[in-house]
Image: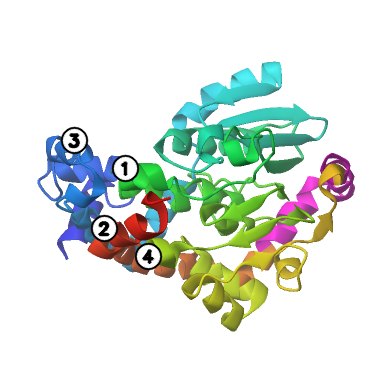
Amino acid sequence: MQSLRVYDELSAARTRFLRLDELCRRAAEKGALPSPDELAAEARLPLKEKKGLEKKQGEFLADILANPVAGAHLCHAMLLPREDSKEKLKKYQQEGKLELDGVHLRRHGKASVLTMRNPKYLNAEDESTLDGMEIATDVALLDPQTEVCVLRGDAVTHAKYAGKRIFGAGINLTHLYEGKIRYLWYLIRDLGFVNKFYRGLASAEASPELSSTEKLWIAAVEGFAIGGHCQILLTMDYTIAAQDAYLTLPARKEGIIPGAANLRLPRFVGDRVARQAILAERRIDCAGPEGRMICDEVVEPGEMDSAINRVVTLLTSSGVVSAAGNRRAFRAGEEPLDTFRRYMAIYAREQAQCHFSPALIANLEKNWKKR
């Protein structure tokens, strides 16, 4: 298969790690994928006018991920700390805080608090937040003074929720419709920082299944966790939710696949409720029966700060070594890396089709743009 031959050559027979965006760039230089100039011209167009050149990237990556050896190697590459994270780590160790596009990281005692910030768009995720989120995740996991990590949304400026903390509204539908989110964004996100929440950071010397740098993650859900932000909760170790918060996965209504939610959500709420949430837009109230299968505790909105401090103390009382070991033990039964790899092979191919489907444009114009 040509894709595997190209991967073998570019990775020097899997002795060199390449992140998937760099992999696609080098494959394009060999003529296996659309060129940077072709992609740049396509990037300037709104989504409805794109030709779908990036579908070839989806086919290429799906072929690699479908192969047990090459796919595991690519997953491993995406779990390594980014090179630019190492410089940011030095700054964080000195100052205990870090400002990045889309995120603020601050150390509070034994915890590093990662605050998602895109206030104009209800903390939605887009190209402007992608790099910052992964760098902040790397830094929090690498910081030797951090024992536990907290994920929270910042206060937003949207008129309806001005001044209120919102966990997040999922993918930025404005940017999606305008063609400002590339296809690779989905895979960089889910193979990158979202998978790092779940699996920690890998090292180049050993399989992620055998060795990783990881810490417990606490999520603090206020307002709502929609789409991608609901997906993130499925990777957390402990979730605290405000009494009035809710979760939704409206990807079907938008016309896309909700990341790894199809793989992970049934473990929390069962197959029927998972299908209702993903295929039929079922809302899950955090304080309801299904919400409590995802959220570990529900508190009054004004009690969130004290709840976070209490849970940080609880989860650090027995040390971080046993926490990392227990996480690995849970994953061995729940979601081995090979299971994730096989899922992502399907996701890479299907999401490419969805991203450029006329149905996605129709759904956005019907359910979002007119609002």
User: Magenta-highlighted stretch: main secondary structure?
Assistant: helix
Q: Position of residue 65 (x, y in %)?
A: 34, 62
Start-end of magenta stretch: 304-328
Horizontal side of 27 relative to 79 (left or right) equals left
Q: What's under tag 1, amino acid-wise?
A: Asp
Q: Is residue 313 magenta?
A: yes
Q: Is residue 207 visible?
A: no
Q: Which residue is labeled 2 in the image?
A: 58
Instruction: Tell me the distance, in whole angstroms, between the alpha carbons under discs 3 and 2.
Output: 17 Å
Q: What's under tag 4, amino acid-wise?
A: Tyr
Residue found at x 58% / y 62%: 248
Q: Which residue is labeled 4 in the image?
A: 347
Classed neighbour count for the residue bearing mark 3: other residues with Cα under 10 Å, few (<14), some (14–19), many (≥20): few
Is 350 above or below relative to 217?
below
Q: Which residue is labeled 1 in the image?
A: 21
Horizontal side of 303 relative to 16 (left or right) equals right
Instruction: Tell me the distance, in whole angstroms, between the alpha carbons under discs 3 and 1.
Output: 14 Å
User: N-terminal of the two: label 2 or label 1?
Assistant: 1
Camera-side residue of 212 and 353: 353
Q: Secondary structure at mark 3?
A: helix
